[in-house]
Image: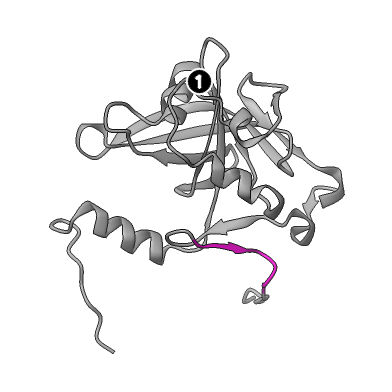
Amino acid sequence: MDKKVFDLGTAETRDAYKLLSGLVVPRPIGWIGTRREDGNHNLAPFSFFNVVSSDPPTVLFSGGRHPDRPKDSVAFAEMTGEFTVNIVSEDVAEAMSVTSGSFTADDDEFSIAGLTAVEGTKVKAPLVAESPANLECVVVDIHDLGSEGSTSLVIGRVLAIHVREDVLDGTRVDNDLLRAIGRMAGNSYINTRARFELNRPG
């Protein structure tokens, strides 16, 4: 079967986004909580997110720009050096979608989505109380990608993890009870209930 080749050096940015977000699926969702220095809260989901190391425990997310300024999550993380990652379960999927809207830097997405902000034990960035699990993070580095910082990559060290006790067996997470969701393309999401196992060789 022949394959169509897309040269991303000449392709439109929107086309590159549609191809990448449609092919790299499902993507975990980093529901990023931040706060301004004046204490104002911010909450937004990012599907360009992942855990990249357990030693040291490290996560990253990337955000683009509004027409006139960086994404608030990126700006607030850089301003305070802190952020949280809140796991998106089926129970909070609708609220997560609400927080993906376009808001001003003064808007509090926690209040808008009817969520409870809880201060962390290691950072002042807000945790989503309704989320089944939360990661408290400090910013390790921020890299500007693309022309004129069109996208910023935020790398964070995880200092503490909060997990609802009913989804835990020691330190093992019961994915059936966690009920996390993933992002597909467009407005499509996927649950994590349909799984299969493959044994590693050796």
In the orientation shown, which residue stands out farthest toward the left? 10
**In screen coordinates, is 23 left or right of 45?**
left
Q: Nearer the viewer, residue 83 or 129?
A: 129
Q: Is residue 86 magenta?
A: no
Q: Residue at x 55, y 47 (%)?
A: 97
Q: Residue at x 79, y 53 (%)?
A: 172
Q: Is residue 190 magenta?
A: yes
Residue 60 appears in view = yes
How far across and how far down the image is residue 84, in percent? 60, 32
The quadrant of the image that shows the N terminus is bottom left
Choose top left, top right, bottom left or bottom right for residue 83: top right
**In screen coordinates, is 73 left or right of 64?**
right
How far across and how far down the image is residue 114, in percent? 67, 34
Is 192 above or below relative to 40?
A: below
Choose top left, top right, bottom left or bottom right for residue 41: top right
| Residue under pointer 1 | 81
The way the protein has been coloured in the rendering is: one colour
Residue 169 appears in view = no
How far across and how far down the image is residue 139, in percent? 50, 26
Report helix, strand or loop for mark 1.
Answer: loop
Q: Which residues are magenta?
A: 188-195
Q: Amino acid at mark 1?
A: Gly
Mark 1 closeness class: few <14, some 14–19, many ≥20 residues within 10 Å:
many
Dominant SS in magenta: loop
Is 187 above or below relative to 56?
A: below
How far across and how far down the image is residue 160, in percent? 69, 31
**In screen coordinates, is 51 left or right of 104?**
right
